Amino acid sequence: QVQLVESGGGSVQAGGSLRLSCVASGFTYSRYCWGWFRQAPGKEREGVASIITTRSGTYYGNSVKGRFTISQDNAKNTLYLQMNSLTLEDTAMYYCAADPGCVRLLGAGDYNYWGQGTQVTVSS
């Protein structure tokens, strides 16, 4: 019933940009936390950025502050991640996730709903 679908991933050279989108459907509530997480092979899933649907405050992982921007369009049930100044370390599978409890804004273990992911590959 609840579904999150990511898009916008691809291959890009270092220093380039990508814009990811996540469309949510099936939620019976309007207030929840949602955000972006990423995971590279052999590494833990990392919180990238998050936001609360009914608020404007944004939260970022230290490694992406100043480079990535999270935003939402509630009318379209869509979450975005603008990724600028990409580096090789940004290469990962990026996931959109949602948590109605908002336990930990960047804590992957507390998010209940996940998309299938979209791959971002950065080359030198």
Image (cartoon, rainbow, N blue to C red):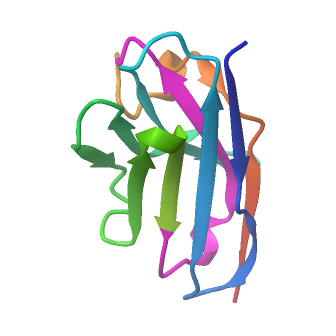
- Where residue 30 sits in the image (x, y, percent)? 40, 19
The answer to whether 28 is drawn above or below residue 31 in the figure is above
Residue found 44% across the figure and 12% down from its top: 29
- Where residue 66 sits in the image (x, y, percent)? 30, 70
In the image, 6 versus 122, the foreground residue is 6
Q: Is residue 100 magenta?
A: yes
Total count of labels: 0
Q: Residue furthest front?
A: 75
The N terminus lies in which quarter of the figure?
top right
Residue found 29% across the figure and 45% down from its top: 59
- Where residue 87 sits in the image (x, y, percent)? 56, 78
Please tell me in which quadrant of the rendered image residue 116 appears. Answer: top right
> What residue span does the magenta drawing correspond to?
83-102
In the image, 70 versus 124, the foreground residue is 70
Residue 72 seen in render:
yes
**Left or right placement of residue 42 versus residue 72 in this view:** right
The answer to whether 75 is drawn above or below residue 87 in the figure is above
In the image, 47 versus 31, the foreground residue is 31
The C terminus lies in which quarter of the figure?
bottom right
**Left or right placement of residue 73 versus residue 6 in this view:** left
Residue 44 seen in render:
no
Residue found 35% across the figure and 23% down from its top: 104
- Where residue 25 sits in the image (x, y, percent)? 64, 26
Q: Is residue 109 magenta?
A: no
**Left or right placement of residue 7 versus residue 23 in this view:** right
**Left or right placement of residue 13 versus residue 78 in this view:** right
Residue found 67% across the figure and 65% down from its top: 91
